[in-house]
Image (cartoon, coloured by chain):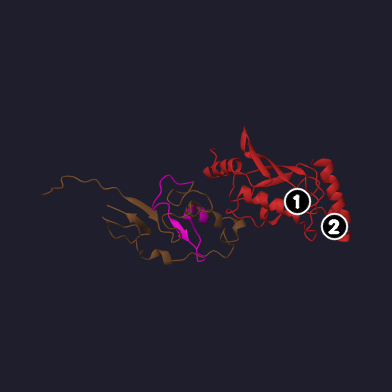
Chain colours: A brown, B red
Amino acid sequence: MKITVKRWHAIAQWQWDTGKTDDNGDAEEDVCGICRIPFEGCCPTCKVPGDDCPLIWGECSHVFHMHCLLKWIGTAASKQQCPMDRRPWGETIAHLSVHTPRNLDRISISSDRREKGRRE
Amino acid sequence: MALPKRIIKETERLVADPAPGISAAPHEDNLRYFDVTIQGPDGSPFQNGVFKLELFLPEEYPMAPPKVRFLTKIYHPNIDKLGRICLDILKDKWSPALQIRTVLLSIQALLSSPNPDDPLAADVAKHYKEDEAAARQVSKEWTERYAT
């Protein structure tokens, strides 16, 4: 039997690789500790999730929506401290390097961004 | 201005899954204003008391802390006559990772462990430092008189 593919419809799904949760992870871990909106959603001031509303990783290993964190760090009350542990906030650049995508089955393209998941 | 999603989520959870001994309900006409009750912790002079508080979420919340005040009279070294509370997380130790729930749990804990070395009500603190047993007795009487 010979099969000819005439048409195919790919569906992509992406997720930030926070390095913290597995796919069955605790939902509480998947939200920004500042706005409580899932990492995959955007911060309260943005309309669209994705690269325009990225995440930011601290040296202390805590992750937030970048916009939420910068808003906090911009206040005098923050004393430039991480909201989770009050250690001096420093951004880590470790996460800017290429990630090993998880969840990547079937169709994939390589990505040098901080995303993982199935893609067309 | 629309109510931020975070406040909606916090409110839903406070109502659906309240912390033990704590209730918080928003006003219908102002969803940033909450009527709160905290039960006096067992083993403290506030035991069996139910204390009313008001909690307001300012526009900047969660970048700024909620404003919380006791409405029920209470004899406590860190709570003054006007119900204002001396608690670090409500001032310089605020963090946006804290929530209404954690703030109210901290206030409940403050009832169990008064700190007369960082007083707001100077006379009460002095009383607690000079004769703790007598001061606790007054706290107990005030609880029976005003918080039951």
Task: Locate residue A11, reporting x and y percent.
Answer: 29, 47
Residue A119 as seen in the image, left or right of residue B148: left
Q: Tell me which residue sits at (52%, 43%) in the image.
A: B5
Q: Chain of mark 1?
A: B
Q: Which residue is mark 1?
A: B42
Nearer the observer, A76 or B68: B68
Crowd rating for badge 1 (residues with CA inside 10 Å; few <14, some 14–19, many 20+):
few
**Observer able to see residue B86:** no
Q: Secondary structure at mark 2?
A: helix
Q: Provide the residue span drawn in magenta.
A: A45-69
Give the residue at x 34% y 55%: A117
Discs 1 and 2 lie in a common subunit: yes
Badge 2 amino acid: Tyr
* Image location (x, y in percent) of residue A105: 29, 57
The residue furthest front is: A1
Q: Main secondary structure of the magenta part?
A: loop
Instruction: Check the residue under mark 2 and report the chain it is in.
Output: B
Q: In the image shown, does A104 or A86 lie closer to the viewer?
A: A104
